[in-house]
Image (cartoon, rainbow, N blue to C red):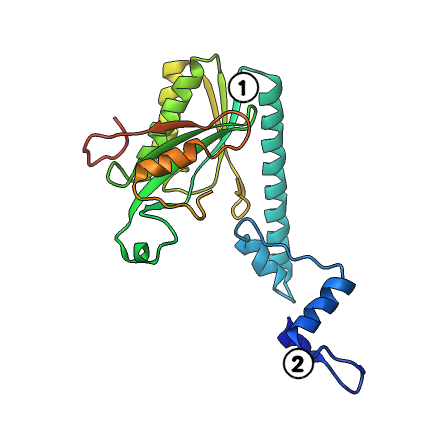
Amino acid sequence: MYKLYCEWFDSNVYAAKAQTLRQYRDVVNFNFNLGFYKPKKDCCDVCHTFQNNPFPNEQEKTEFMLHQKRMKTARNLKNKDKEDATLNSNILAATFDFQKELPSPHGEVSILYYKRKLSTYNFTVFNMGTKDATCYMWHEGIANRGANEVASCLYDFIKEHKRKGITEFRFWSDNCSGQNRNRIVFFLYLLAAKEFDVKIIHRFLEKGHTQNASERRLIYVPDEWYCLVRWAQSSGNLYVLQVLKSKKSSRGGFF
């Protein structure tokens, strides 16, 4: 901003100029009520493209309005599911997603940057009604993170909560076809609905609007990631952690 200020400043218009970055910072901080927000999520590419298009045509305007309408509809339905789950103990509304890959070793030691990394995966199912989370974790030596693994985790989640009296599950996720929106997960729902006699609904948030603790930690092995996730909750109940194991199989999934 200071560099832009120096280019913008016109000595014929303004009498005084901040000569140094320190002077500029003092003037801005003291005289202007400005704040800088760092987004907590990736920006939607559809919204970003439209907002940076100075002359959108009618088709682009229509598509953007439909995009916004779908986003608001999904959010309203999600809030309604959360409210229903809070009021009715037989309904469970949950979101699920993978955390970004957790590499081991991990830390702020420069030599670790050059070490070959072992990725650890964290598939989290968050109960919107009770605000409890179940974390299924494994490393890449156990299995991948595709549709088979997602289906296995969801099957275990449904089975465990059916024992607690849940008769209706309402899931929310992003639109990733390799993990969530595919026939394998759909057939898992058919199996679970028949085996446990429950109702299962899975809705998807609008693309680009699917937002649903490790800094300065020294991590050597996946077990340390498991411990960190287990104690990540600063208040309320601890996260439920399931460390998964698998037999060797070309089909993936857990057994």
- Circle 1 — which element? strand
Of the pair 52 and 12, the residue shown nearer to us: 12
- Residue 55 point in image, percent of width and height: 65, 66
Mark 1 lies on residue: 91
Mark 2 lies on residue: 7
Residue occupying image coordinates x 38% and y 20%: 192
- Residue 64 point in image, percent of width and height: 61, 53
In the figure, is residue 145 to the left or right of 124? left
Disc 2, disc 1: CB below 8 Å? no
Quarter of the image for the C terminus: give it: top left
**Between discs 2 and 1, the one toward the N terminus:** 2
Position above or below: 202 against 5? above
- Circle 2 — which element? helix
Residue occupying image coordinates x 62% and y 28%: 80
Q: CA distance from mark 2 to mark 1?
A: 60 Å
Q: Quadrant of residue 25?
A: bottom right
Say which amino acid is labelled 2. Glu
- Residue 86 point in image, percent of width and height: 60, 21
